């Protein structure tokens, strides 16, 4: 139950509301017990001689009012606390996930993370706002009924409750089993979310290869797996009501056997026995609810475990307690004997002993075959990952001693896969500078050669671009990303194959926009086409994670046996083939 107790700590800021809810529950319990107690005067006085009729009627109404108000306020206040706790927990979980490193997202699917934020937290919400309220309210009511039973006849009360301990063991065992099956159900739901998210994200590929039926079958298998897991949960839940009914039946039989003897002997009146039996019957409702409460708590424990597993996962990219801020544009960036390997491949490093010094304002081009480590190298600079060995220094300061916010504020990023949000054009450009004015946004768009197509859109800069910018062409999306980087106005720029997937006309526009973007900035350019790196101040050639050549374009071409010359020759050969193919 440790995850559940840990969960309750999030309710500590709302202890005042919890106290008020508990008071309301006492009113509910008092009203419930009073209704059972009033059966005695009804049978002994009101029905035989109409004695105390008005007093009894007023008492019945007052008991119902007390019970109703207690029920309303306890449910409302507990639901309010539950919603607040879950909102806090969901916000904390979301912020925690966003703070994780790139390795964290590499090891988990989007469906998994979404399932934790929605399904698991939703299960916890029901536990905090509904289940715990029922647990306290029905326990208090049960205590009130039990007190009434002992008030009438403690011997009869003990006889009726002899079966209660017998049902506790199966309840505990079933609860443990329910926790395991609930976890399986949540994992199945997580898998189904992942399958659907993949298909929706890649819908064009699904349609292009006619794979709709295949994906539907895949989803069907995931849905059937969820169905089986849910039926296991239902099977366990369905056992509880018959157990409680059996317990209730045993109690009634015991009451009839013992109570009839007490009435014959004159130690118990008919009214006393009727009130006693009524209280016993009324106890059945809370007892049955409590059996369900135990089941809900076990389900909440399973979900809490999954949530806290995520909250207890800490990023390996940690900000130092005494981290300093970068306050000025860097004069020099140094990669000093840098080695890097992912957690699952540290014995096979992706980067090996990379040493490089870059001066402010230089354009550094990084080239090499796929898998050489180009993107990994530039991802180390904003600390998406931390180096395994060696260090990256800015003006002689290890970037691990610098605050992440100040480090990343110095860096602008444009990647091959442009990430845009389902928002307006203006808000997407201003994503890097939320306080930017529309004049500044338009100036960045003009410099990125994006103003013309934006102005042609129905609502201009207020036009929505749909999820991932699907209403725009590849070149248009890329120019918006460049406008975003321009507006950030960061002194360091990373361009990761920003033009590799564009047609010739779009590439020319984007190249011109990139030239504006790189002006007076320290730029790291990963280029697929070597023609785009001719003007680089320094070209780095990577092979299998090692720098094998460095120099300017002309210097490297002057080495006919060098790696850069081979790459250049291969690209020229490919271009010639492209020219010949249309003619054929």
Image: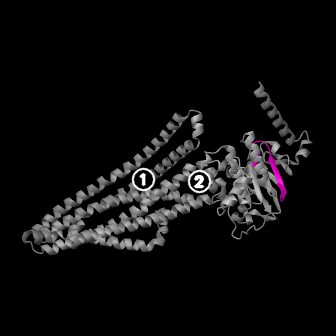
Residue furthest out toward the left: 49
247 and 405: which one is in front?
A: 405
* Figure check: 517 above or below 11: above
Q: Toward which corner of the image does residue 507 lie, by quadrant?
A: top right
The image quadrant where one finds the C terminus is: top right
Q: Which mark is residue 423?
A: 2
Tell me the SS state at disc 2.
Answer: loop
The Cα atoms of the two marked residues, 2 and 1, are separated by: 46 Å
Residue 318 lies, in percent from the top left, at: 67, 63
Residue 508 lies, in percent from the top left, at: 77, 44
User: In the image, which residues are magenta?
Assistant: 355-374
Q: Residue 177 carries which label?
A: 1
Q: Can residue 87 be seen in this view?
A: yes
Q: Which residue is drawn at 32% across and 72% down?
A: 26
* Figure check: 573 above or below 302: above
Q: Residue at x 73, y 43 (%)?
A: 506
Q: How crowded is mark 1: few (under 14 residues within 10 Å), some or many (20 or more)?
A: some
Circle nearer the N terminus (2, 1) = 1
Residue 126 lies, in percent from the top left, at: 42, 59
- Was residue 123 drawn as part of the magenta stretch in this picture? no
Q: In this view, does 3 lie to the left or right of 375?
A: left
218 and 250: which one is in front?
A: 218
Residue 558 lies, in percent from the top left, at: 92, 42
């Amino acid at each position: 139950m440790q995850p559940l107790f840990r969960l309750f700590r999030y309710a500590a800021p709302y202890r005042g509301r919890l106290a008020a809810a508990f008071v309301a529950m006492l009113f509910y319990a008092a009203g419930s017990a009073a209704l059972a107690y009033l059966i005695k005067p009804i049978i002994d006085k009101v029905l035989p001689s109409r004695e105390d009729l008005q007093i009894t009627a007023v008492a019945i109404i007052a008991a119902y009012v007390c019970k109703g108000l207690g029920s309303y306020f306890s449910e409302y206040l507990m639901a309010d606390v539950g919603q607040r706790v879950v909102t806090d927990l969901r916000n904390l979980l979301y912020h925690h996930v966003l703070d994780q490193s790139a390795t964290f997202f590499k090891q988990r699917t989007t469906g998994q993370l979404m399932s934790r934020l929605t399904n698991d937290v939703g299960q916890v919400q029901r536990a905090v706002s509904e289940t715990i309220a029922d647990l306290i309210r029905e326990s208090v009511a049960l205590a009130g009924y039990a007190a009434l039973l002992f008030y009438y006849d403690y011997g009869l009360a003990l006889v009726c409750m002899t079966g209660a301990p017998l049902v506790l063991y199966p309840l505990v065992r079933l609860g443990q089993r329910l926790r395991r099956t609930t976890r399986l159900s949540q994992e199945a739901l997580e898998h189904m979310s992942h399958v659907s998210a993949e298909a929706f994200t890649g819908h064009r590929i699904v349609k292009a290869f006619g794979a709709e039926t295949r994906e539907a079958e895949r989803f069907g298998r995931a849905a059937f797996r969820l169905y089986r897991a849910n039926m296991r949960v239902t099977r366990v839940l369905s056992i509880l009501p018959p157990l409680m009914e059996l317990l209730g039946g045993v109690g009634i039989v015991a009451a009839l056997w013992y109570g009839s003897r007490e009435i014959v002997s004159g130690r118990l009146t008919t009214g006393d026995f009727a009130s006693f039996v009524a209280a016993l019957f009324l106890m059945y409702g809370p007892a049955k609810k409590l059996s369900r409460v135990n089941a809900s708590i076990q389900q909440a424990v399973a979900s809490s475990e999954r949530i806290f597993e995520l909250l207890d996962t800490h990023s390996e990219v940690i900000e130092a307690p005494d981290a300093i801020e970068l306050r000025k544009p860097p004069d020099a960036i140094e990669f000093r004997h840098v080695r890097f390997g992912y957690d699952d491949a540290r014995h096979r490093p992706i980067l090996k002993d990379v040493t490089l010094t870059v001066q402010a304002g230089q354009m550094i081009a990084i080239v090499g075959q796929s898998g050489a480590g180009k993107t990994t190298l530039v991802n180390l600079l904003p600390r998406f990952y931390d180096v395994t060995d060696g260090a990256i220094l800015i003006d002689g300061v290890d970037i691990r001693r610098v605050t992440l916010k100040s480090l990343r504020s110095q860096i602008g990023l444009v990647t091959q896969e442009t990430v845009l949000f389902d928002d307006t054009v203006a808000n997407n450009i201003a994503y890097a500078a939320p306080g930017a004015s529309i004049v500044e946004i338009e100036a960045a768009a003009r410099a990125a050669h994006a103003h013309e197509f934006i102005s042609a859109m129905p609502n201009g800069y207020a036009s929505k671009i749909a999820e991932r910018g699907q209403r725009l062409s590849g070149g248009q999306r890329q120019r918006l990303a460049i406008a975003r980087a321009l507006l950030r106005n960061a002194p360091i720029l990373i361009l990761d194959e920003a033009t590799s997937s564009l047609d010739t006309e779009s590439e020319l526009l984007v190249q011109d926009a990139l030239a504006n973007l790189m002006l007076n900035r320290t730029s790291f350019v990963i280029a697929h086409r070597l023609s785009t790196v001719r003007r680089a101040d320094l070209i780095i050639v990577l092979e299998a994670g090692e720098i094998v050549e460095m120099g300017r374009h002309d210097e490297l071409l002057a080495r006919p046996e060098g790696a850069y010359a081979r790459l250049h020759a291969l690209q020229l050969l490919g271009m010639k083939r492209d020219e010949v193919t249309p003619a054929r």
